[in-house]
Image: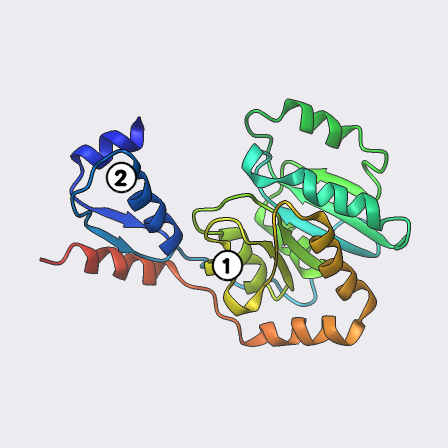
Amino acid sequence: SFMEAHLRNSEKFVCISECSRRDVVALAERLGLTGDLDTTVITMGANFERADDDLPLPTEAPPGRYLLSVATVEPRKNHRLLIRAFDRLKEAHPDLSLVMVGKAGWMTEELQQEMLSHPDQGERFRWLSKVDDHLLDGLYRHALLAVQPAFYEGFGTPVIEALGNGVPTLSSTGGALPEAGGEWAEYFDPDDVDELIELIERHLNDADYHRERRDALVTYHPPTWEQGAIGIATAFEP
């Protein structure tokens, strides 16, 4: 109802991805609002300094290699897929851990209890719900991989933040995530745990491949909020 009200009364839609633009146009068509929509696409940004290479491993992080996922705990973020992947990998890779960063969101009480009662909670499985920027920098600096399994994202800021910190990133194909990650990320179906496991295992088992993916990110530059501001200004030019 919120979007329908805007579609009936707003004159312009500034969308944060091509996916978001397609979705708002598709919704208008489903609602029978056939008039031309004035839409434009801008980028969101990730203005931050890359974490220092010499940041020590945070005490909150597990030893060894770990997967890092940054997302509010809410239904569309698809945490269970990543937990399932970790549970299937952990016996074959005893040095592998999983770190999930994000506050508790809505409609996930059962999932939150599963995370808090995970058999490896506090050891190889860690849910950190309160993390400041300095700690997050340290977690990024020492992560083996960043993983974003969301069913849908309107843009995908955690993907560009991970890439901007030089962390090889595995992302689902949900929503606009492929737009955010481009050629820099590797992708899996958000409903396919086997596909995710295959990607993780390639990095675990092929050190040369992992090094190549990490080294390639030296030349990655995330979009900036200045670019987003220019896009907004351009959208409203007469």
Residue 96 falls left or right of residue 200: right
Query: For the residues marked 2 and 1, what is the alpha-carbon distance in whole angstroms?
Result: 24 Å
Residue 25 falls left or right of residue 128: left
Residue at the limit of the structure toward the left, as seen here: 238
Tag shown at residue 25: none
The kind of residue tagged 2 is: Ala
> Which badge, 2 or 1, is on the more N-terminal residue?
2
- Residue drawn where x is 20% and y is 56% of the image: 235
Quadrant of the rendered structure where residue 137 is? bottom right
Quadrant for the C terminus, please. Answer: bottom left
Quadrant for the N terminus, please. Answer: top left
Quadrant of the rendered structure where residue 31 is? top left
- The image position of residue 19, as x and y in percent, is 39, 52
Tag shown at residue 28: 2
Q: Secondary structure at mark 2?
A: helix
Do tag 2 and tag 1 residues touch (Cβ < 8 Å)? no
Residue 3 falls left or right of residue 220: left
Q: Pointer 1: what residue? A: 178
- The image position of residue 72, as x and y in percent, is 57, 38
Image: 26 above or below 74? below
- Residue drawn where x is 75% and y is 59% of the image: 198
In this view of the protein, can residue 109 be seen by the observer? yes
Residue 55 falls left or right of residue 35: right
Q: Secondary structure at mark 1?
A: helix
208, 175: nearer the viewer: 175
Quadrant of the rendered structure where residue 40 is? bottom left
- The image position of residue 75, as x and y in percent, is 57, 33
Q: Residues within 10 Å of mark 1 (few under 14, many from 20)?
A: many
54, 225: nearer the viewer: 225
- The image position of residue 116, as x and y in percent, is 75, 29
